[in-house]
Image: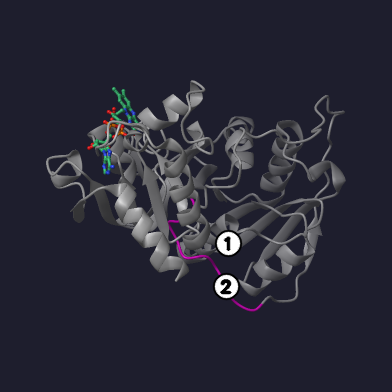
């Protein structure tokens, strides 16, 4: 069995976030000797977690230059760890930080990288990656003979590792970091009144363009739509998704849902999140949108049109109803 190295960057407090714990669980399930490489300002808490998971070696690049995500320092740290470990198989969580740095790492090591894996395990005696292609329409299983082989595992595919931490013996790894020209001065995110994307939420609530269209009385009711949706999100803690039509309208500065950005878009040219349940409202359920629902466990939709896309095998339950009326009632029940 080949040795597997988990690469993880740590959080501010030195611990591991959920995607890293999921990749740790996948690395353990893989079998073989487990090495762990940690990168961050502090690594002590993470080292204890991975010690509890039975890591045979814990290699770390720690210190302030490695606190911030930055290609030059991240790739250099990951490269030094991979060379010190010598593991032929490397697994890492799909975070924006690793997604930027690890393809370059594969080039530096003369290896290969696969991104957006949904599973990584031994199949028919060889390591195999499972991933989706063509915006989640086809699932494929791949093997590779080249080593080192780096695999970025998508979040939400494996239950995260959780067990008592152990006592860690950390091997510090020296990195020769050339003077960096990049300084992170802060983070600027799209203007959104409040955080509406919650990857860990049990429910995905999708709003479609219907919320901004003229209703039965011949008028639009955008302000009420905003209130209904925000009230629901606050009480249910659901994650908010949008159809392309709706987020495009918002991007044009129209008087629409102000908290909706392109980051909320679900579908072929948007995101494919993982949630146990989904509720679509005022959204037609066309294929380019519904393809983003591939990993939603149970799908329900509210639409005035009994002949909408959801009715054609895309939803488990379609409520033919006015979403304004439904959400008013749901919100009343939730606060009551
Ligand atoms: C190359 C390509 C890529 C695309 N990628 C994406 C993508 O990633 N994501 C995506 O979403 N789309 C994508 N689209 C667009 C997609 O095909 C649809 O145009 C879009 O999803 C429609 O958005 P919608 O359902 O919100 O709006 P509409 O089609 O306008 O539907 C609005 C719905 O609201 C309903 N409605 C109105 N009022 C109410 C009410 N009071 N109660 C209940 N229901 C009501 C109406 O019956 C209607 O079904 C893509 C298209 C192309 C060509």
* Crowd band around label 2 with a 10 angstrom C-alpha radius: few (<14), some (14–19), many (20+): some
How far from the left and from the top, in percent, is residue 186? Answer: 78, 35
Mark 1 closeness class: few <14, some 14–19, many ≥20 residues within 10 Å: many
> Which quadrant is the C terminus positioned in?
bottom left
Residue underneath mark 1? 21
Ligand 1: give its quadrant.
top left
Of 269 and 224, which appears nearest the observer?
224
Position in image of residue 87 (x %, y %): 60, 51
> Within 8 Å of ligand 1, the CB of disc 1?
no
Asked if residue 106 lies left or right of residue 133, the reply is right
Which residue in the rendered view is the most extreme toward the bottom? Answer: 164
Judge whether 29 appears above or below 151 on screen.
below
In the image, the segment drawn in magenta is: 154-164
Residue closest to the eye, 43 or 327: 327
The residue lying furthest to the top in this view is 252
Residue at 30 percent across and 41 percent down: it is 282
Q: Which residue corresponds to mark 2?
A: 162
**Magenta segment includes 162:** yes
Tell me if label 2 and label 1 are in contact, CB under 8 Å: yes
Residue lying furthest front in this view? 217
């Amino acid at each position: 069995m080949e040795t597997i190295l988990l690469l993880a960057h740590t959080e501010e407090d030195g611990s591991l976030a959920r995607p890293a714990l999921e990749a740790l669980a996948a690395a353990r399930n893989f079998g073989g000797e487990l090495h762990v490489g940690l990168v961050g300002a502090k690594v002590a808490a993470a080292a204890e977690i991975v010690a509890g998971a039975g890591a045979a070696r814990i290699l770390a690049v720690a210190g302030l230059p490695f606190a911030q995500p930055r290609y030059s320092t991240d790739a250099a740290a990951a490269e030094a760890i991979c060379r010190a470990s010598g593991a032929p198989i490397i697994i890492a969580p799909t975070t924006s930080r690793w997604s930027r740095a690890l393809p370059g790492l594969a080039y530096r090591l003369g290896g290969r990288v696969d991104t957006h894996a949904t599973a990584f395990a031994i199949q028919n005696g060889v390591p195999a990656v499972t991933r989706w292609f063509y915006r989640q329409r086809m699932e494929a299983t791949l093997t590779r003979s080249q080593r080192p082989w780096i695999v970025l595992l998508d979040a939400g595919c494996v239950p995260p590792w959780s067990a008592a931490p152990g006592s860690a013996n950390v091997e510090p790894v020296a990195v020769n970091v050339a003077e960096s020209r990049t300084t992170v001065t802060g983070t600027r995110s799209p203007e959104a009144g409040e955080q509406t994307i919650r990857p860990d939420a049990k429910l995905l609530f999708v709003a479609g363009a219907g919320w901004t269209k003229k209703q039965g009385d011949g008028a639009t009711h955008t302000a009420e739509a905003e209130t209904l949706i925000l009230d629901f999100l606050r009480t249910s803690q659901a994650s908010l998704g949008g159809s392309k039509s709706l987020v495009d309208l918002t991007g044009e500065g129209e008087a629409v849902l102000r908290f909706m950005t392109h980051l909320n878009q679900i579908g072929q040219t948007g995101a494919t999140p993982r949630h146990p349940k989904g509720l679509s409202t005022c959204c037609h359920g066309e294929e380019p949108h519904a393809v983003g629902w591939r990993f939603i466990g149970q799908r329900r939709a509210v639409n005035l049109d009994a002949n909408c896309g959801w009715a054609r095998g895309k939803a488990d339950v379609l409520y033919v109803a006015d979403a304004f009326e439904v959400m008013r009632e749901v919100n009343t029940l939730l606060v009551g």
